[in-house]
Amino acid sequence: MSTYRLEDLKQYSDTLHTRQGEPLNVRFVEPGDTDELQYYFRSLTTRSRYNRFFGALSELPNGLLNEFLDVGTRERFTVVVTKMVDGFETIVAEARYAFHAETSTLEFGLSVDDRWQGNGIATALMKNLECRAVALGAEHIFGDTLRSNQTMISLARKSGFAFVNHPDDWKLVRFDKEIDIAPIDIPCASWRLAALSRQVERPSASA
Ligand SMILES: CC(C)(COP(=O)(O)OP(=O)(O)OC[C@H]1O[C@@H](n2cnc3c(N)ncnc32)[C@H](O)[C@@H]1OP(=O)(O)O)[C@@H](O)C(=O)NCCC(=O)NCCS
């Protein structure tokens, strides 16, 4: 499983809920999202962008934008969380994740539109990423954050992650969680199906 076709990926669209119960859609980014994605990053506060990319960016540079839009290559994916605002599908959060088959780990980074922070969106999105991790065969899910990013550290702690030093950068801390969910118990329907069909195709994957 290294390169995916967008038509195949479109079936993996999930519903998340804010803490107030408002439904949001989470789906893979598509080429038609280019302007909206760039607008989303430009609209984040300077601080949120700094926390997301560990440096000062006003928008995604072209190379990074192309990486974000390239879904599935080398098991790297971007998802957007969207909501209908005045009849337009609007991005309110995003996550980029990579499956590292050699270590059976899924690495991710994410952000939520500042106007939407504090509503449980990142909590719900991280749960969804855990479903994706199990479906890909990951045994651990992890991310890196700046040591100064107390919001992310508090969110990771509440979500059951443990903390370890970053292997190369003292300014960062790594949060890591073992995922011990059997494919049949994955709490996201489309990823449960994906994991079960993966088990049928590769029976040894579940051993
Ligand atoms: C970190 C981030 C993703 C959290 O998103 P969010 O949707 O607001 O998070 P949630 O609403 O799910 O909050 C979950 C927990 O995070 C913590 N949290 C959220 N906002 C916080 C704040 N302003 N201060 C301290 N802790 C906060 C709390 O523990 C909260 O749980 P609680 O509401 O039960 O107290 C968001 O702040 C963000 O996008 N920041 C910029 C990018 C970034 O830092 N990314 C992480 C590195 S990749």
Image (cartoon, grey):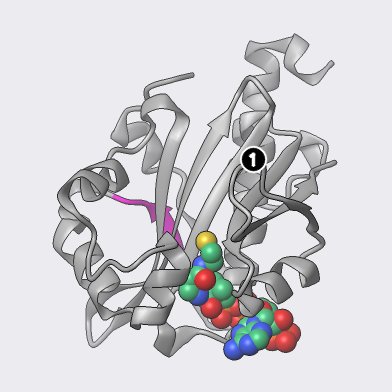
Residue that mark 1 sits on: 133
Q: Residue at x 74, y 45 (%)?
A: 186
Dot 1 alpha-carbon crowd within 10 angstroms: few under 14, some 14 to 19, many 20 or more: many
Count of marks placed on residues: 1
Residue at x 68%, y 25% (from the top left corner): 103
State the image quarter where residue 145 is shown.
Answer: bottom right
* Horizontal side of residue 182 vs 7, given as left or right: right
Q: Is residue 143 visible?
A: yes
Q: Quadrant of residue 172?
A: bottom right
From the viewer's perspective, tell me whether residue 144 is left or right of residue 205: left
Note whether 89 is above or below 193 in the view shown: below
The kind of residue tagged 1 is Ala
Q: Position of residue 84 (x, y in %)?
A: 32, 78
**Quarter occupied by the C terminus:** top right
Range drawn in magenta: 25-29
- Secondary structure category for the residue under label 1: helix
Q: Residue 109: percent from the left, percent from the top?
A: 51, 55
> Would you say residue 46 sits in the magenta stretch?
no
